[in-house]
Amino acid sequence: MPHIWIVEDDEDIRELVLYALRSANFETSGFESGDAFFSMLHNKEAPSPDLLILDIMLPGDDGLFILKKLRQNPQNKALPIIMLTAKGSEHDKVKGLDLGADDYLSKPFGVMELLSRIKALLRRSNSSAASNPTAGNQPDISYKNIQMNHTRRVVTTGGSAIALTFKEYELLYCLLVNADIVLSRDKILLTVWGYDYEGESRTLDMHIKSLRQKLGTAGEHIKTVRNVGYKLGE
């Protein structure tokens, strides 16, 4: 049974999420601060989290600092992390995604959407882990000055390596293997995130924005197709 951890200082929100997770048959642990979270994380007798829900506004170290600290540890590179952000705080969303968050939800959020995001991330994480041993058998992919070495999971533009988060890499891979094909938002969300939640989400838009910035001039190859989605190509 997946074990979900949440770091949220608002007791009402924390308890609501914990109740919803337990009702959905997840194992759960809740923490009000980063100190409490890391204390449990370093406890060798405690179960490791399969997914983390992390609020940004926390007493002491904020969620972005905790996220950065987690991603610096190779053992936590693949841990799915959903950030909780204040409504309209685009700067925090972009920074969170850039530091390695897999997804985010703006407060206030619906419990059913949160559960859907959690299930989708867990499915995607399990699928990626299962397919990882065969990654070396997959051919490298390129489009103009963008090269992806799938064996090493390395992306370069003009010979320079680009540091991408797990989801940014998956998104670019989706675009590369479908070069010059217009992909709908729903198709990309289903392929990269596995969403079965039929609701509006800016997660994809924020990842596209971050991916374009990291690719530099090569990011211009990612085109927005109004009212449809995105494509990599002219």
Image (tube, grey):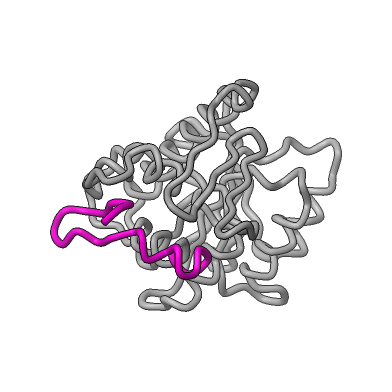
Q: Residue at x 49, y 53 (%)?
A: 146
Residue 142 % position (x, y): 47, 44
Q: Which residues are magenta?
A: 212-234
Q: Residue at x 40, y 43 (%)?
A: 176
In the rendered image, which quarter is residue 165 located in? bottom right
Q: Nearer the viewer, residue 189 or 219?
A: 219
Does residue 132 appear to the left or right of 171 in the view shown?
right
Residue 225 on the magenta segment? yes
Residue 103 % position (x, y): 46, 54
Quarter of the figure with the C terminus = bottom left
Q: Residue at x 65, y 63 (%)?
A: 32
Does residue 136 appear to the left or right of 205 in the view shown?
right
Q: Nearer the viewer, residue 171 or 31?
A: 171
Looking at this view, name the residue that lies furthest to the left: 227
The total number of labels drawn is 0
Residue 89 on the magenta segment? no
Quarter of the figure with the N terminus = top right
Does residue 77 appear to the left or right of 107 in the view shown?
right
Q: Nearer the viewer, residue 204 or 157?
A: 157
Residue 231, placed above or below residue 224 = above
Residue 209 % position (x, y): 40, 67
